[in-house]
Structures are given as structure tokens and as C-alpha cells.
């Protein structure tokens, strides 16, 4: 297949639309099910690059959950804890493989944002991935291959219209890439910069204790940022991006947005949240929405009379501001990455409030001394990578 005609572009009025290779060669992918659209392919091809690079850099199965050309989450395939199985709605009978664990964790980063996502896997999709996806609202998946059982399950999804793309894992793009904006062609070299542990040697803080696990978290953060709309900041814990702040014009707004998402991820593990008495008929997406409101300042929207009865068997106790603050203060050992330098120490101050112990950023601000001083104040380990990771 050299060209694939699409229903339309970003919007229904943008016709005709297609994808093809400029040199007339075969496309490095196959459509096994469904009819992916223009934005589906943008998500698929960006997310595939992310998981491929993450697998190469860490040696671990990697997955991502994409929405609107940015990752809602990304993760490597560590085994799920019992708490993670509960907050990600993994049924007791499912024994997820490492690649399934990677996707479940990636989707679990921000389940509201992953509603209707495009999934990406570094490894062959097996039946445990497909079984988990069966109950989730998702637009499609890209992977280097599929087992027979997995493909059979996925082809049943969305009445046979679920988008399944198989990518050639050996495909490499042309070193130069082009795009048109307002009829004018832009050309640049493909961003083939390799992110690995060699990037993490310039530790600029007094505390230089950077364990192996934190290095993996830094790599996960930086590779996630490489494929996130800039400006962007990413919080990571245990090989999982737990807060991605994308597309903000202000660096501190990225840090706050990503930090709030990381806090929300942690709040889902609060005992009061784990014990919420949901009605049996309430579906996953409705539970996610209810939890999001319950842990926010707008909790009354789900707890007032006439509303709580729709989702709960009994009215839950309010999770007070003091309880939330106390719970968030228990979080520690997080890593934060930034796609460009922190211009002020306020980014470190905000990151510290969410339990950040490690920071990876390019450096190069005229106020680097202030940023380092702020990190030293909290005994944070900070690496200057020297590499900006803007993505547009």
C-alpha cells in the first residue's frame, strides 16, 4: 500500500485527505481493522516513536496512551501492585503480561484524558492487552505485531470498527522531514537524538546520589517529553509518567498542571477513595469521572442529595482539604523532567510540593544559580542534560 485515502483531515471540512510516502514507496504499516483517521495516524506515529525509543533506552516493554498528539501517559512494564490493579480496574482473573502492565500503567496515569485514546506498544500485542482494552473506551492501537488471539478480540471491539495498525518495527524515517504551514514548506532534520543514561552525568546539585531507578525515571520523563506538545513538564514514579503538563505557554503553568495530575494520581490511592461504595452498574468511565470530582474542590457536585445516589450505594464522607494535604505530603521519590530550562526556582518549589526528589532539565537559564540553589534547599538531585526537547 503506497497511499491511504482518509475520510477527512483534522476536521470534516478538510478534504481530501490521505497519507503516503513522498518517494512513492510502500507505507511501513498495515491496517488490520477499522478505518483510522488523520488524527488517529498522528497519534499512532508519534506514540510509536515514543514507545520504540523507551524500549531501546530502558530495555523494558513500553507503552503509551495518546490523545490529540500528546501522551496522556507512558510507562514501562513493571508488575502491577495490588493497589494499582484496583485503581486501574484490572479484574482478578486477568494475569497481565509485561507489555500489558506497561499499557495498563500508561492508561492509568490520567484515565480521564485517556478516554478515547490511541494505544501504542513497543512489543507484540498479546491477549492480555486485548482483554484489558475490551472494557476500555479507546480509538485504536499501534504495535509491531499481534497474536492471533489478541487480534480476534480487538476486531470485535466497536462492532468491528476498532482501529488496529501494525507498524514495521525496522522502519526508519528519512533524515530530513517537511511540513506545510499556510502553503509554505518547512524542512528540518528528524529529531533522532538518543536519550539514555549518558545524558544524566552532569549533576549540578550538592546531592549527587542518583540511583538506577531514578535514572530510568528520568529517561521515561525525557522520552515522554520528546513527543509531547511544548512547553511540557513530566512527573514520573517507578517507570510511569504520572503527570504530563503539555502545550502551556508558561513553564510554571506546565509544572503546576503536571503536578496537579501527579497529585490526582496519588489521591486515587487514598484509603477513602479506594473504599468509595460504587453501585455495581456504574461503568469505569463514570467511576473515573466521579473520583475526579470527589477528590477536587467541587466534590459537592457528586456528594449532594440527588447526585450521590446515581453512583454510590451510600453517601461517602467528604475528603477534606486537610486530609488531601496530609496525603499528598506522604508522596516522595518522584522525578520531574522539563523539555526546556526552568527559568526560575518557583518550578522547583512547585515540584517539591508533589514529592519530587530528582529533576532532569536542559539548564542554560541566566538564573540557573537560583534554580540550583532552590534544589539544594530541598536536597533534590538535579541533572542538566544540555538538550532541549521542543516538539510541535
Image (cartoon, rainbow, N blue to C red):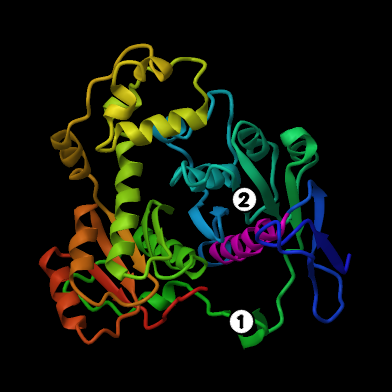
First in sequence: mark 1 vs mark 2: 2
Q: Is residue 333 left or right of residue 11?
A: left
Horizontal and vertical percent position of residue 53: 57, 67
Magenta-highlighted residues? 37-54
Which residue is denoted by mark 2 in the rendering?
118
Q: Which residue is mark 1?
A: 190
Task: Tell me if I can see residue 2 in this picture.
Answer: yes
Neighbor class of circle 2 (other Cα within 10 Å; few <14, some 14-19, many 20+) is: many
- Determine the residue positioned at 30% across, 50% down: 260
- Residue 316, by quadrant, is top left
Residue 247 occupies quadrant: bottom left
- Name the secondary structure under disc 1: loop
Residue furthest out toward the top:
313
- Answer with left or right where residue 267 lies relative to residue 54: left
> Relative to 335, is 291 above or below?
above
Q: Residue at x 63, y 87 (%)?
A: 187
Q: Is residue 39 magenta?
A: yes
> Is residue 76 depicted above or below 26 in this figure?
above
Instruction: Locate the N terminus by quadrant.
Output: bottom right
* C-alpha distance separating marks 1 and 2: 23 Å
In x, y percent, where is residue 335? Answer: 32, 60
Q: Position of residue 357 (x, y in %)?
A: 24, 60
Residue that protrudes farthest toward the front in the picture: 13
Q: Main secondary structure of the magenta part?
A: helix
Residue positioned most to the left = 377
Amino acid at each position: 500500500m503506497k497511499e491511504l485515502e482518509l475520510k477527512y483531515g483534522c476536521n470534516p471540512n478538510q478534504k481530501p485527505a490521505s497519507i503516503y510516502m513522498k518517494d512513492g514507496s510502500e507505507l511501513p504499516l498495515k491496517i488490520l481493522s477499522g478505518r483510522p483517521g488523520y488524527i488517529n495516524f498522528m497519534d499512532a506515529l508519534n506514540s510509536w516513536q515514543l514507545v520504540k525509543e523507551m524500549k531501546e533506552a530502558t530495555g523494558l516493554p513500553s507503552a503509551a496512551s495518546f490523545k490529540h498528539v500528546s501522551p496522556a501517559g507512558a510507562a514501562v512494564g513493571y508488575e502491577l501492585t495490588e493497589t494499582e490493579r484496583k485503581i486501574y480496574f484490572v479484574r482478578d482473573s486477568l494475569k497481565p503480561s509485561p507489555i500489558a502492565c506497561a499499557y495498563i500503567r500508561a492508561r492509568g496515569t490520567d484515565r480521564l484524558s485517556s478516554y478515547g485514546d490511541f494505544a501504542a506498544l513497543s512489543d507484540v500485542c498479546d491477549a492480555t492487552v486485548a482483554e484489558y482494552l475490551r472494557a476500555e473506551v479507546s480509538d485504536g492501537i499501534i504495535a509491531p505485531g499481534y497474536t492471533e488471539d489478541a487480534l480476534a478480540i480487538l476486531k470485535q471491539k466497536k462492532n468491528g470498527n476498532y482501529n488496529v495498525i501494525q507498524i514495521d518495527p525496522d522502519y526508519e524515517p528519512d533524515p530530513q522531514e517537511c511540513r506545510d504551514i499556510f502553503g509554505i514548506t518547512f524542512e528540518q532534520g528528524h529529531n533522532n537524538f538518543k536519550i539514555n543514561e549518558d545524558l544524566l552525568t552532569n549533576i549540578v546539585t550538592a546531592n549527587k546520589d542518583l540511583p538506577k531507578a531514578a535514572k530510568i525515571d528520568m529517561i521515561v520523563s525525557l522520552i515522554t517529553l520528546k513527543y509531547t506538545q511544548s512547553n511540557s513538564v513530566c512527573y514520573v514514579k517507578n517507570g510511569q509518567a504520572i503527570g504530563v503538563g503539555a502545550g502551556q505557554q508558561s513553564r510554571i503553568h506546565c509544572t503546576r498542571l503536571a503536578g496537579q495530575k501527579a497529585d490526582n494520581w496519588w489521591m486515587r490511592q487514598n484509603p477513602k477513595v479506594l473504599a468509595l461504595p460504587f453501585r455495581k452498574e456504574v461503568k469505569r468511565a463514570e467511576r473515573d469521572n466521579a473520583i475526579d470530582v470527589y477528590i477536587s474542590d467541587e466534590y459537592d457536585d457528586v456528594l449532594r442529595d440527588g447526585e450521590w445516589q446515581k453512583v454510590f450505594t451510600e453517601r461517602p464522607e467528604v475528603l477534606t482539604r486537610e486530609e488531601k494535604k496530609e496525603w499528598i505530603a506522604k508522596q516522595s521519590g518522584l522525578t520531574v523532567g522539563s523539555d526546556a530550562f526552568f527559568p526560575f526556582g518557583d518550578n522547583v518549589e512547585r515540584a517539591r510540593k508533589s514529592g519530587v526528589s530528582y529533576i532532569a532539565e536542559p539548564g542554560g537559564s541566566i538564573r540557573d544559580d537560583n534554580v540550583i540553589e532552590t534544589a539544594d534547599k530541598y536536597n533534590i538531585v538535579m541533572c542538566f542534560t544540555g538538550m532541549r526537547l521542543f516538539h510541535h
